Amino acid sequence: MDIKKPTSAQQSRHVQSEVVKQDTKRTFGSLAAAIVLVLTLAVLVTSGVFGYQALQKAGSTVSGDVQEDRFQAVFLTNGQVYFGKLSNVEGNYIKLKNIYYLQVQQAVQPSTSNPEQQSDTSDSQVSLTKLGKELHGPTDQMFISRSEVLFWENLEKDSTVVKAIADYENK
């Protein structure tokens, strides 16, 4: 059996053919990767747009829950509670106007007349204070970061706080 060795021209054509096949495979692989990348980006952008729209709709239902004819109580992460008229609940900052807050006043020295009747709360007095009378003179409007708000709620028209606000405003 006579085995023929390929000539150098045949070897050269074979090498060129292999290089062309590899270049074609690389080009096709790069093209496929580019298509996958574009499709992935399209899906992410589309889901982001629809997700943002869903959040906007969810926020607008919260806004619809603010009863404008009532006062709201806003509870903050630091334990403070403000009462007022709430608006702009969809933004990064909620807006509160006509603001009141609770102030606890404690006696400097406890009474010693009857030690058996004393408790921690007997020397404390809670009062409702209108915002604006403080030393720094704030306006009757507050913008509160949503991240600092635990929750808010509408107040009943006959609640103790709303009655105290009405008494203050009727003076």
Image (tube, rainbow, N blue to C red):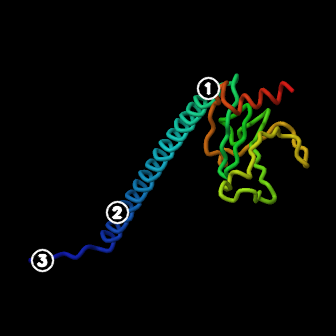
* Viewer-nearest of discs 1 and 3: 1
Q: Which type of secondary structure does the marked residue at label 3 adopt?
A: loop
Tell me how far mark 1 sits from mark 2, CA to CA. 70 Å
Residue type, mark 1 in image: Gly
* Viewer-nearest of discs 2 and 3: 2
Does 24 sit left or right of 150 as displayed?
left
Q: Is residue 147 above or below residue 7?
A: above
Q: Is residue 169 above or below residue 145?
A: above
Towards the viewer: 30 or 81: 81
Residue linked to disc 2 = 17
Q: Quadrant of residue 21?
A: bottom left
Residue type, mark 2 in image: Ser
Q: Position of residue 20 (x, y in %)?
A: 38, 60
Question: Which residue: 74% across, 36% down?
Answer: 95
Does 83 sit left or right of 41 as displayed?
right
Question: Which residue: 37% across, 62% down?
Answer: 22
Residue linked to disc 3 = 2
The N terminus appears in which quarter of the rendering?
Answer: bottom left
